[in-house]
Image: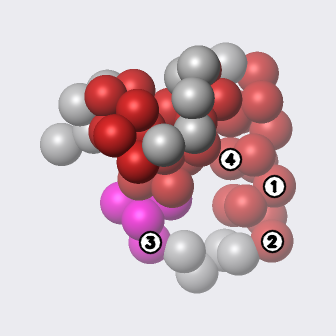
């Protein structure tokens, strides 16, 4: 998704010390919210892809 790539670029530039796993988890959560139909914790969890 284009929005996730932009967010990744912005966060990487503005917060260079962010841990890679934390950034990956944050971006996965944002992607789940953007692609989901509802903004509930359960729907966010269902929208997560395997980030292991």
Q: Secondary structure at mark 1?
A: helix
Mark-to-mark CA distance, 4 and 3 = 12 Å
Residue 46 as seen in the image, left or right of residue 15: left
Q: Earlier in the sequence, mark 3 or mark 1?
A: 1
Name which quarter of the figure residue 12 lies in. bottom right
Dominant secondary-structure state across the stretch colored magenta: helix
| Residue at (57% x, 29% y) in the render | 38
**The magenta stretch spans which residues?**
19-23
Please indicate, yes or no, whether residue 48 appears anywhere in the rendered image: no
Instruction: Report the quarter where the N terminus lies.
Output: top right
Q: Is residue 21 magenta?
A: yes
Mark-to-mark CA distance, 4 and 1 = 6 Å
Q: Return the x and y of residue 26 as percentages of the image width and height.
A: 51, 55
Q: Is residue 49 magenta?
A: no
Mark-to-mark CA distance, 2 and 3 = 13 Å
Q: Secondary structure at mark 4?
A: helix
Residue marked by disc 2:
14
Q: Earlier in the sequence, mark 4 or mark 2?
A: 4
Mark-to-mark CA distance, 2 and 1 = 6 Å
Q: Earlier in the sequence, mark 4 or mark 3?
A: 4
Mark-to-mark CA distance, 4 and 2 = 10 Å
Residue marked by disc 1:
10
| Residue at (68% x, 47% y) in the render | 8
Residue 33 as seen in the image, left or right of residue 16: left
Contact, CB < 8 Å: mark 2 with mark 3? Answer: no
Q: Secondary structure at mark 3?
A: loop
| Residue at (66% x, 74% y) in the render | 16
Contact, CB < 8 Å: mark 2 with mark 1? Answer: yes
Contact, CB < 8 Å: mark 4 with mark 3? Answer: no
Residue marked by disc 3:
19
């Amino acid at each position: 998704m284009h929005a996730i790539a932009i967010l990744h670029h912005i966060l990487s530039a503005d917060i260079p010390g962010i841990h890679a796993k934390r950034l990956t988890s944050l971006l996965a959560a944002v992607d789940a919210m953007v692609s989901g139909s509802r903004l509930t914790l359960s729907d966010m969890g269902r929208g997560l892809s395997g980030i292991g």
